[in-house]
Image: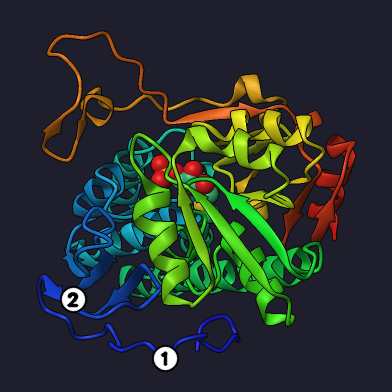
């Protein structure tokens, strides 16, 4: 039981006690804590292989985040929290100030992995504040180790509970017998697990007895839609049709999309939304065709310190993701390449933002702030 909500599927493995890389059946909780270290479902291999990695040091966790073993903003935040708990657990010594140095160093390493997903920095800050409070209370090194682990587990539990509430509020916005288009993977795989944000909204509607089918953009260049969203929804028996990214306009024009639901990596105070590259194009098309464009994200994704989308750092990734698919070369050697991982959808294209506190609508500068006060 996580966050007080029942699993939609009974996990086949119980995670604890895995010793090294093990291939196992699906369990849509992509990151877990165990006595051995942090367990991550290797999302680089999906959908053809289901393999778990055991990461025993914080820098292995950082590498796992950077290399996309785990991805999706909330899942990155949960992983970073566990990474800091791991840094504390592997610390040898009894001096609290030395432990503080170690936590600071680990936070720095983890914070250099993915710049756009604000949940990463949110989780690191929360773990550092927890450390500071425990130190101020005069706790010993071994007590602080336990406090940090409890906090990381709390962040994980809260994330799953937030997704459950997003699913409930968002599910209410979708009509029965509707087709929803989504971009990238904002599912259980991208979060602490179980529901997901955008896919949580869809799961929420299905749980409310509605019939919903999904159109999944393949999401070039990393193909999170084709590899992960299609796989996740099929595992849940939710009807899904995969399209290439350039097909959505045609399908919208024919009346084949009733709503768009996406996740986010960072939402600015004014409601501008950073999400997977290509989201902005989908939002423009949705507006052209009068289709509601919903964003689903926990408040840990809302960054009130970023006044607008222009203040959000946009990650640029390796050129090989564009020129190759796995080891297959698609483009001529030496061609110029851009590989922006995210774009920003301006708030006027966003119909509503669904968080664990409810549904926020424009003007977001007010409605988002109110959600923090609830
Ligand atoms: O590069 P990724 O796969 O980490 O990008 C993920 C996304 O853009 C998701 O839509 C976003 O993180 C929201 S996940 C609930």
Along the viewing direction, whichever of 173 and 352 lies nearer the viewer:
173
Residue behind label 2 places its C-beta within 8 angstroms of ligand 1: no
Q: Quadrant of residue 213?
A: bottom right
- The secondary element bearing badge 1 is classed as loop
Q: Nearer the viewer, residue 336 or 51?
A: 336
Marks 1, 2: nearer the viewer:
1
Mark sitting on residue 10: 1
Residue at x 68%, y 50% (from the top left corner): 256
The disc placed on residue 213 is none
User: Residue at point 82% right, 38% down?
Assistant: 290
Q: CA distance from mark 1 to mark 2?
A: 22 Å
> Residue 327 lies in what quarter of the image?
top left
Quarter of the image containing the C terminus?
Answer: bottom right
Pinpoint residue 295: horizontal percent, then vertical percent.
Answer: 69, 48
Q: Which mark is residue 36?
A: 2
Residue 71 percent across, percent down from the top left = 38, 51
Identify the residue at horizontal 61%, vertical 35% (top origin): 250
323 in relation to 367, above or below = above
Image side of residue 245 versus residue 334, left or right = right
**Position above or below: 100 against 233:** above
Residue 227 spot, x, y in % from top left: 34, 54
Q: Is residue 152 visible?
A: no
Marked residue nearer the N-terminal end (1 or 2)? 1
Nearer to the camera, 118 or 180: 180
Q: Classify mark 1: residues with Cα within 10 Å, few (<14), some (14-19) or many (20+).
A: few
Q: Nearer the viewer, residue 212 or 223?
A: 212
Q: Position of residue 38 (x, y in %)?
A: 26, 67
Q: Is residue 330 left or right of residue 276?
A: left
Element class at badge 2:
loop
Determine whether, in the image, residue 257 is placed left or right of residue 80.
right
Mark 1 in CB contact with mark 2 (< 8 angstroms): no
Q: Is residue 348 among what the camera can see?
A: yes
């Amino acid at each position: 039981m996580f966050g007080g909500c029942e699993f939609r599927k009974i996990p086949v493995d119980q995670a604890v006690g895995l010793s090294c890389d093990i291939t196992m059946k699906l369990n849509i909780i992509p990151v877990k804590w165990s006595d051995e270290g942090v367990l991550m479902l290797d999302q680089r291999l999906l959908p053809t292989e289901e393999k778990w990695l055991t990461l025993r040091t914080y820098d292995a966790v950082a590498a796992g985040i950077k290399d996309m073993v785990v991805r999706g903003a909330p899942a990155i935040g949960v992983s970073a929290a566990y990474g800091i708990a791991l840094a504390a657990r592997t610390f040898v010594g009894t001096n609290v100030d030395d432990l503080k140095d170690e936590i600071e160093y680990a936070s720095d390493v983890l914070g250099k992995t993915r710049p756009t997903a604000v949940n990463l920095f949110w989780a690191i800050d929360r773990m550092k504040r927890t450390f500071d409070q425990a130190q101020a209370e005069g706790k010993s090194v071994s007590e602080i180790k336990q406090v940090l682990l409890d906090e990381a587990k709390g962040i994980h539990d809260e994330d799953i509970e937030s997704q459950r509430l997003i699913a409930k509020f968002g599910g209410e916005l979708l009509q029965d017998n509707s087709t929803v288009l989504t971009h990238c993977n904002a599912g259980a795989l991208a979060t602490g697990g179980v529901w997901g944000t955008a896919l949580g909204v869809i799961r929420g509607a299905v749980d409310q007895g509605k019939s919903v089918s999904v159109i999944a953009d393949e999401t070039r260049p990393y193909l999170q839609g084709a590899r992960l969203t299609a796989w996740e929804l099929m595992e849940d028996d939710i009807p899904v049709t995969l399209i290439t990214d350039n097909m959505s306009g045609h399908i919208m024009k024919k009346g084949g999309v009733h709503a768009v639901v996406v996740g986010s990596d960072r939402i600015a105070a004014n409601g501008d939304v950073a999400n997977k590259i290509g989201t902005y194009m989908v939002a423009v098309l949705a507006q052209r065709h009068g289709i509601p464009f919903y964003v689903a994200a926990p408040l840990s994704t809302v960054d009130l310190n970023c006044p607008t989308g222009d203040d959000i750092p946009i990650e640029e990734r390796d050129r090989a993701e564009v020129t190759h698919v796995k080891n297959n070369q698609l483009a001529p050697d030496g061609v110029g390449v851009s590989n922006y991982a995210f774009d920003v959808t301006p708030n006027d294209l966003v119909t509503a933002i669904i968080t664990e506190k409810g549904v926020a609508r424009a003007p977001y500068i007010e409605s988002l702030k109110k959600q923090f006060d609830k």
